[in-house]
Image: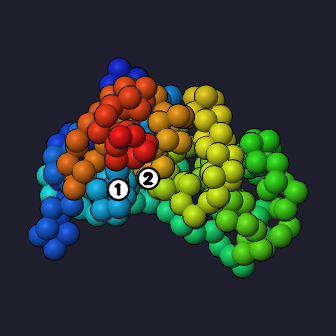
C-alpha cells in the first residue's frame, strides 16, 4: 500500500489533455495542490474547469499527461476507487436525493463507516451548517437552493475527505447565500482539508483561495497567488469588473 508522506504535492496534474470526440477540451494543463491548500480554477463557461475536475475523478479519459493524488497515479482507476482514496465531491447543480430526508442524504455520504464515526461526522457537519440540523427530517426537495448546496457539501464531508472538490458552488445562489456557502468553505479549508474549487465567481473564489489558476479555451492562461490574480489586469477585466 502506498503511504503518502507529504513530500510531494497532494494533488498534481502534469500536462493533462482531454479530448471530446477528437476535439481538445484540455490542453496540457498542469497544476498542484499542497496539503491543506485551497486552490481555485476560474474561467468562463467552456474554459475547461469542469473537464479538469472530471479528469481528476476519472469521469473522462486522459488523452495525455498524468493525474496523481498523494503520489498515486489515478488514470487507470474507476471514479468510485478514486473517491475512496479520500476525495469528497460536490457536483455542479448539487444533485441531492430529493425524496430522502436531510439526514438520509448525509448518511449516504458516510457510506459504510462505523456508526460511532458517523455520529461524530454528523456533529461536525451540523456545527458547520446549523440549518441542516434544524431541517434533518425534511425532504431534500423542500430545501432552498442554498440549503441544498449546504447539504451537498455536508454529504461530501461525511466521508472525511482529505481533498474536497467543488464544481461551481455558487451557481444559482443569491449573493447572500453564495457568501454564506463560501464562508463555510473557508472554515473547511482552515480546518486542514485541501480544497479544489471550479468557480465562475472569481471575486468569491479568490477571496477564499490561497492560489488560483485561470483557464481559457482548455489551456492554462494564468496562475499565481489569489492576491496576485485579483490584481492582474486580465483577471480584473474579464472577471472582476475592472477597466
- Considering the numbered disc 2 on the image, is that residue within a helix, a strand or a loop? loop
Instruction: Determine which residue is flagged by label 2.
Output: 200
For the point 69% across and 46% down, which residue is it?
180
The quarter of the displayed image where residue 137 is located: bottom right
Check the image and name the residue furthest to the top.
Answer: 7
Mark 1 Cα shell of 10 Å, populated few (<14), some (14-19), many (≥20): some
Nearest the viewer among 88 and 140 is 140
Is residue 222 something that shows in the picture?
yes
Instruction: Determine which residue is flagged by label 1.
Output: 44
Using residue 170 as the reference point, say whether residue 1 is left or right of it.
left
Using residue 108 as the reference point, say whether residue 239 is left or right of it.
left
- Image coordinates of residue 71 in percent, x first then y, are 32, 34
User: Whole-Å distance between the Cαs marked 1 and 2?
Assistant: 6 Å
The quarter of the displayed image where residue 221 is located: top left
**Rendered-image quadrant of the N terminus:** top left
Work out whether 200 lies above or below 208: below
Colour scheme used in the picture?
rainbow
**Rendered-image quadrant of the C terminus:** top left
Is residue 211 something that shows in the picture?
no
Using residue 73 as the reference point, say whether residue 112 is left or right of it.
right
Query: Total of numbered circles in the picture?
Result: 2
Nearest the viewer among 204 and 16 is 204
The earlier-in-sequence mark between 1 and 2 is 1
- Image coordinates of residue 140 in percent, x first then y, are 73, 71
For the point 30% across and 62% down, which residue is it?
46
Nearest the viewer among 27 and 156 is 27
Nearest the viewer among 59 and 120 is 59
- Image coordinates of residue 149 in percent, x first then y, are 64, 59
Amino acid at each position: 500500500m502506498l503511504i503518502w508522506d507529504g513530500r510531494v504535492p497532494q494533488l498534481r496534474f502534469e500536462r493533462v489533455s482531454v479530448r471530446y470526440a477528437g476535439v481538445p477540451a484540455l490542453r496540457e494543463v498542469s497544476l498542484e495542490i499542497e496539503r491543506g491548500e485551497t486552490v481555485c480554477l476560474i474561467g468562463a463557461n467552456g474554459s475547461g474547469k469542469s473537464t479538469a475536475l472530471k479528469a481528476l475523478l476519472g469521469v473522462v479519459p486522459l488523452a495525455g499527461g498524468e493525474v496523481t493524488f498523494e503520489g498515486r497515479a489515478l488514470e487507470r482507476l474507476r471514479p468510485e476507487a478514486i473517491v475512496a482514496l479520500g476525495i469528497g465531491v460536490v457536483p455542479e447543480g448539487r444533485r441531492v436525493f430529493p425524496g430522502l430526508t436531510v439526514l438520509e442524504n448525509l448518511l449516504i455520504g458516510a457510506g459504510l463507516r462505523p456508526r460511532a464515526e458517523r455520529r461524530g461526522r454528523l456533529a461536525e457537519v451540523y456545527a458547520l451548517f446549523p440549518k441542516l440540523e434544524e431541517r434533518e427530517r425534511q425532504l431534500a426537495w423542500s430545501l432552498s437552493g442554498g440549503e441544498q448546496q449546504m447539504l451537498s457539501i455536508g454529504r461530501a464531508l461525511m466521508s472525511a475527505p482529505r481533498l474536497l472538490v467543488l464544481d461551481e458552488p455558487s451557481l444559482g445562489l443569491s449573493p447572500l447565500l453564495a457568501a454564506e456557502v463560501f464562508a463555510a468553505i473557508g472554515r473547511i479549508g482552515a480546518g486542514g482539508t485541501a480544497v479544489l474549487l471550479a468557480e465562475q465567481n472569481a471575486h468569491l473564489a479568490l477571496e477564499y483561495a490561497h492560489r488560483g489558476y485561470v483557464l481559457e479555451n482548455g489551456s492554462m492562461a494564468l496562475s499565481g497567488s489569489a492576491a496576485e490574480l485579483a490584481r492582474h489586469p486580465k483577471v480584473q477585466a474579464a472577471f472582476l469588473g475592472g477597466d
